[in-house]
Amino acid sequence: MSRSWSRSLHACVGAATALAALAALTACGGGADAPAEGTAEHPVTVTFWAWTKGSQEVVDAFNASHDTIKVKFEEIPSGGNGGYPKIANAVKAGIAPDLLSIEYPMLSQFVSQGSLQDLSGYLTDDIKKKFLPQTIKLTTLGGKNWAVPFDASPQVFYYRKDFFEKHHLTPPRTWDEFRTAAAQVRKAAPDTRIASFFPDDPTFFQAMAWQAGARWFTTDTARNAWQVDTTDPATLKTAEYWQGLIDDDLVNTSSSFSPEWTSGLKQGTLVGYLGASWSAGVLAGIVPEEKGKWAAAPVPSWDAAQTASGMIQGSTFAVSENSHKKAAAVEFALWMATSEAGIKARIGASTSTALPASPAMVPVAQKAIDTSFFGGQDLYALYLQAGRSIKPDWIWGPSTGATNSALGDQLREAVGGGSTLSRAVRTAQDATVADLKKRGLNVEDAS
């Protein structure tokens, strides 16, 4: 990819609206890789930035098994702790690495800024069939593929099996049953709560709304516009439900991973955790002394006859706009996501319980993880079922930062009694629309 193409890309994107920008990224040119890239005559080194545990081990395994493509890895802070600003600044300076780890919620924002390259020519139909279709949809914008999915992160309910058995409780299948069980837990042990509502983590609430059928962002291709509605009926239903649990003191409201939250787990005053597939490894690391006392179940749904899930985070691999080695970078990304050696190296080197976005890789993850903390339960059978039930219509818009900032502030207020969750999503709506307009993107307030 030439520097002249890079300058043309920025000029093209600068004149485009949100959806037009996505199309323009392809229309302005694609920067073909050199035909001999990654051959014995022309070996290449791909640079890679990520923060996930096990990344160095994956790179080591790839380098040990490949001669013509090598990978140089640099660990960066997690996205929310400075990784994304570091990536954005590097792209602007023209020094970004070839391959980047980017979570699904942030992908659209980087695409709309012209920071990533279109990978459609490499993700053929046969390759896309290797992944859960929901993950392909989440990485497809403007009809183009912008990243290789690595994991899916469907919601899961983790609970203290010993507490539930002692008090003759069963894992709730529906949200109505969850509220009933929450009251029963508090009655059995007044200081104990069934689970938490995280006021500091907007992605927790977003996943709940997603599961209920919300669609905060849609696209109007005829008008080249983003349509935003964070106050649709599914979201308001979710907000009212959780507001009731908070008002009635049926859930813990400590910040996620805070000392208070961790203390609740260790002291047994918190006997459930509404997390994602990756949360099992986190939980086992926090309370290893409770080995054998925990179990996992499908997240409650609104309809007893139909399981459903949203997603909490989840990661992809994208090629930066600065890269001249797209073919090699994609080869490495696909190796990480769809090869047995790649999955085994990543998961086996950490306590991660990530669900591979490629269902064929689930048995590999299954063998790599010690599930004795959960009494040997087959977690991955549950995760795969949950992954297949992810609501398929959700897409992330190009203003995740503004949405989450406004929503996060209001969630804290709602927990403290100074606001409500219904008001929080209204504030998020206004902030999102204002941010998109400020950035010169075509947006319609669909609320």
Image (spheres, rainbow, N blue to C red):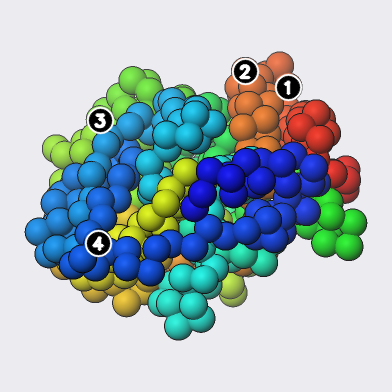
Question: Could you give the CA–CA distance between mark 1 and mark 4, rounded to whole angstroms?
Answer: 61 Å
**Nearest to viewer (mark 3 / mark 1):** 1
At a point 21% along the width and 70% down the height, the residue shown is: 340
Disc 2 and disc 4 in contact, CB within 8 angstroms: no
The amino acid pointed to by label 1 is Ser
**Nearest to viewer (mark 2 / mark 4):** 4
Query: Which mark identifies residue 42?
Result: 4
The answer to which of marks 3 and 2 sits earlier in the sequence is: 3
**Nearest to viewer (mark 1 / mark 4):** 4
Query: Which mark identifies residue 419?
Result: 1
Q: Which residue is mark 3?
A: 266
Left or right: residue 235 versus residue 366 is right
Question: Could you give the CA–CA distance between mark 3 and mark 2, rounded to whole angstroms?
Answer: 24 Å
Left or right: residue 140 versus residue 282 is right
The answer to which of marks 3 and 1 sits earlier in the sequence is: 3
In the rendered image, residue 244, in percent from the top left (x then y), is placed at 67, 37
